[in-house]
Amino acid sequence: MKKYKIAIVGASGFTGSELARLLARHPQVEITAITSETHTGKLFSDLHPQFFGILDMSLVSAESVSNSEVDIIFLALPHKISMEYAAKWKNLSAKIIDLSGDFRLSSPEVYKDWYLKEHTFPEGFKNAVYGLPELFADRIAKASLVANPGCYPTASILALAPLFAEGVVESDSVIIDAKSGLTGAGIKASEATHFSNVNENFKAYGIGVHRHTIEIEEQLSALGHFNSTIQFTPHLLPVDRGILVTAYATLKNPVKQNQLDEIYQKFYRGKTFVRLRNSPPGIKDVRGSHYCDIFPTWDERTQRVIIISAIDNLLKGAASQAVHNMNLMLGMEESIGLNQIPLRP
Amino acid sequence: MKKYKIAIVGASGFTGSELARLLARHPQVEITAITSETHTGKLFSDLHPQFFGILDMSLVSAESVSNSEVDIIFLALPHKISMEYAAKWKNLSAKIIDLSGDFRLSSPEVYKDWYLKEHTFPEGFKNAVYGLPELFADRIAKASLVANPGCYPTASILALAPLFAEGVVESDSVIIDAKSGLTGAGIKASEATHFSNVNENFKAYGIGVHRHTIEIEEQLSALGHFNSTIQFTPHLLPVDRGILVTAYATLKNPVKQNQLDEIYQKFYRGKTFVRLRNSPPGIKDVRGSHYCDIFPTWDERTQRVIIISAIDNLLKGAASQAVHNMNLMLGMEESIGLNQIPLRP
Amino acid sequence: MKKYKIAIVGASGFTGSELARLLARHPQVEITAITSETHTGKLFSDLHPQFFGILDMSLVSAESVSNSEVDIIFLALPHKISMEYAAKWKNLSAKIIDLSGDFRLSSPEVYKDWYLKEHTFPEGFKNAVYGLPELFADRIAKASLVANPGCYPTASILALAPLFAEGVVESDSVIIDAKSGLTGAGIKASEATHFSNVNENFKAYGIGVHRHTIEIEEQLSALGHFNSTIQFTPHLLPVDRGILVTAYATLKNPVKQNQLDEIYQKFYRGKTFVRLRNSPPGIKDVRGSHYCDIFPTWDERTQRVIIISAIDNLLKGAASQAVHNMNLMLGMEESIGLNQIPLRP
Amino acid sequence: MKKYKIAIVGASGFTGSELARLLARHPQVEITAITSETHTGKLFSDLHPQFFGILDMSLVSAESVSNSEVDIIFLALPHKISMEYAAKWKNLSAKIIDLSGDFRLSSPEVYKDWYLKEHTFPEGFKNAVYGLPELFADRIAKASLVANPGCYPTASILALAPLFAEGVVESDSVIIDAKSGLTGAGIKASEATHFSNVNENFKAYGIGVHRHTIEIEEQLSALGHFNSTIQFTPHLLPVDRGILVTAYATLKNPVKQNQLDEIYQKFYRGKTFVRLRNSPPGIKDVRGSHYCDIFPTWDERTQRVIIISAIDNLLKGAASQAVHNMNLMLGMEESIGLNQIPLRP
């Protein structure tokens, strides 16, 4: 069987290592290059010891990708750097899946407003497809540049999409109180990632200004065909992995619980990786897997909808979502290589 | 110096052990009895090994309290059992501080609606004073029965009280997304408290039905002089101690950040244990202390107020709050024995 | 392709759920029954929510296994109960893999000395093969009853086996200081498994009397052809998964580091799941995988060998080891279904 | 009452913040200066938010200490830097308590062997007293320079001192398997202190070469009046605070458990902060306190002594031990300001 050739650009972060973990076991692809500019020549397993004896390939410079024939390039890079590679490689035959935030928004202008930086590859926006397979599988299948969604947006949009698509939600009523494991903050050592500041601690950050706010707002507004201002508050959990979103919304008209359930069941019919739960999911129910668990509930007393959603931020919120997009882009069955059962306990 | 005599009724739980920890070092009281019906005769330090060699007194039956002369009785018991002791000891000269939920609400009827049990000492309600010192210090000083507030209500009410007292908050707009450390679930071994269900996990529970909802609602409604329905969602954090509340509210009129700050500064002037922070507090900033840290912020984009508050659920949310009440009830300086600096890291 | 039929007896514990996780994705077997006497009729995913929508099969009584045609029966039961099923099913054509401690020792007498219970199926001992594939692959392949090793013994024996097999270790010099994640204590709610007793805590237990001592002692003594008394001290780590063993031994003659390395390399040549590391492994390097990482070091100053080994206690220490044994017993390639890359972070 | 004047040199680390926490509540001292060269002018609470509103004093340069009249100077600095201040201030009237490793060993030569650096203040050694109050209270009381012991050495020496003082231990038989919370690694952000490398992980480090080895070896050898080579292996626990030592030793002659107990009871009679436990202590039993819990046990089967000891590495292993030394040096009652009951849960 022919295997597709894959390059992972950016080896040092969590996203890169999780992509490698999934792709090394994917039956229809082979990893032909993993790149790092700062660690060129080292082994991949030197950076990530869990791969010792499993994936010991030498890291190469991204330059080498320019000249190789690969089918898919994953950009596992910080934003701003990602766009430079997307620009540089725009004429390659390889399709690109960008895991940074550089092509997730609607325009360079919006990008600048929220990322506070000038976008250096504005033409990229017109080709970029937002890579949330539950919403855009068809477009993703034809895309040459996919913007892999942010972790918070994945959990938030999936929690609320049925209400927006159905047109039942009251404009500007949505509040998203989100909580993420520490890996969402990245692999870089800093005061914020020091064990003693995270362990046994919990706090909010980026109140009112987090960049994922606009990503959520744009996608939900598009689904609902109206502009909706979203309140989004992220918090840092003292765990490695997992995002739990608690979303609140007012509806245009009161519903019954079973009507609410129907809206969600209809919307997610046939979506393998969304599990509509009958009790509130915890983040450990999805850890190590590609699932998004969702629990919508109608509070009759307060006349409000509360939706809980849970994902693994490094997988459905990043790496496995990227592999899902790859499957679609290469015309394979969408769930190949993604059937890991959650690791619990 | 004369020392007041104290009894702790209920030795086995976290509340009992934390009361003992504080009272054993309080300069003006002495613990004359710690009771347990199931562990009578054992040493207190047999149940809580941290007290080995420090507080090894034998546990006695609650009966012995009936006949002793104590100044304050702390009821560190489950609700429903607590009310029985309050009834039984109503004619003792000792003042009672009840750490359960039995006397926190406005009436036996409301109690029954939310606790799903008939109250067996309905007369208790007319004497009971809600023991939140920042709001009711004068009444507490004269009370014979103090209902020590719940942990979530303490953090929630303190977060929102200034807005309700000032009359600026929009009715029914309040959403409280609360997160608590595991000790809030009590010392009893159960599936819910098993390490593997808590560690690396995070989930919501009691959505729409948690008993602390009505406690918060009643207190805030009374402060605001109007009925306000509150949305309250508790979550379980994989940490020992700490509650973080993220509260959202719409105001009747937009404000500026400095106006919001003034409302809070005015309300909490002279309140030693409320710290108005200039950045979002984490639960570790207050761990092991009697402080409640509060950070109110105005989101100009969404035209909403977001308030973060943090407490140690076992202290400001239970034991140290009870000691604070005791200090007031015995006419002592209110902060005696409560000046522990937060234990961080 | 024909698939082998598998029954898992005992659904409620961690071992049962981890077996199900591995077997549900094993390409050459199908799970035909999962049993539970206390939860008969419930869904497997009711007990273990991570399987929601993935493995929702109804739990059946173990009785039904008696009458079905299965190839392998996994006993995921407490010791003492396990032996009863082994006795009852001794004439079935199915081969049995027992994950309890009931058939790991050399005789009913030794069993009684350490488990403090009379063994009710003493004949079982003569057929039982100790299921450590790195040592006994040939015997396992022919066995009808395999005693799956304990978690501590797996990590301890693999750490020390090369030294005993080579005959270089000084009798009675071995000290094993072992540390295990909490899942080793089982799924039952108890004071010992309560989050607040485990989290941020660490302690030793079973000093000098832990049952795994004799299991390690018997296996190493047999390998070395002499009786060796082993010092074994287990400790409880505040993590879900993982065992780290720090073993100390005096050798009959001093060695050089490279000689020590050669002893280990020779012994583990061709053993896929033992990774000889060049720096001390952490438990997270093997989490979620079947690997045993080993790091032997010679301390020239103290003239002692120190060996570090790390496994996932639920996998190489239980479920994946059982699957490895199954592969051997059914004549399949030994690593099928076991190639999970460690989940880190 | 006159209060002694105290300076803390080095504000940014855990040791500095814990010293401040204890000294700010010590009834007989006042903190007159806290220094930092990199954060001069900032508030102490800017660095350590738990002190917000409690200890907001401005940080000053260490220069200012040179000219002020203080009674005690605490050096809460990295080793190598500490010795420079000790040299510079050798003629001040203030007594110095150095919390680094710079004066703990017997000579500049030994220092160089283990710290791999030339000592720049070799004369300091002749005045320096090893600040372990249980062993050297008299000498500490008269010292002008106290070398506060390392965290591992404190737990290790206290675990083994009675056996060495009694002369019963077999030379070179001691193995110390030690485990420390992450704060032992310091406040600096690094790969080693990144949450994702610590959480749910556990590993050994510094095998055979850790600097605390020689500190333990020298002290125990001196107590036993013979040279004893010690095996010492430290490990990193995924917790904030706490050290647990599991020490193994062979005795010259077998003992009975009660004889062993007597040796320990005799040695620690009157030592307030050593608690001889009757079951294995966990690190949470001493968290937030100055206690060292010790549990010695005789293993009749292996003819070996196993001793467990537990301390809070930041307190008995650093800051509270320094305060204990200060109390002795200033002629105060030794336990003043140190009676915190362990914080558990």
Image (cartoon, coloured by chain):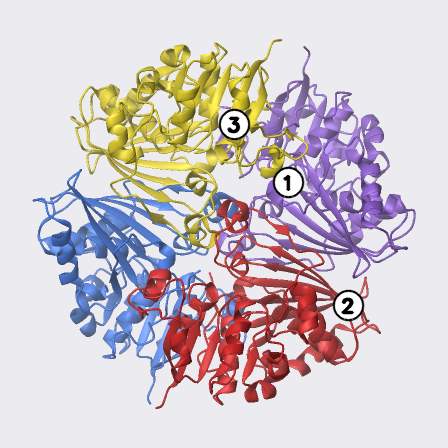
Chain colours: A blue, B yellow, C red, D purple
Residue type, numbered disc 3: Leu
How far is mark 3 from mark 1, CA to CA?
22 Å
Dot 1 amino acid type:
Asp
Q: CA distance from mark 1 to mark 2?
A: 34 Å
Q: Which mark is residue C274?
A: none
How far apart in space, not on screen, are marks 3 and 2 (Cα)? 48 Å
Q: For the residues labelled 3 and 2, say whether their Cβ atoms are less than 8 Å apart.
A: no
Q: Nearer the viewer, mark 1 or mark 2?
A: 2
- x and y percentages locating residue D128 in the rendered image: 82, 35
Q: Relative to C107, is C314 above or below?
A: above
The three-letter code of the residue at mark 2 reads Thr
What residue does disc 2 label?
C229
Specify the label residue D312 is tagged with: 1
Chain at tag 1: D
Left or right? Give the position of C177 relative to D51: right
Left or right of C209? Residue C315 is left
Q: Is residue D95 above or below residue C156?
A: above
Q: Residue A340, image x and y in percent? A: 36, 70
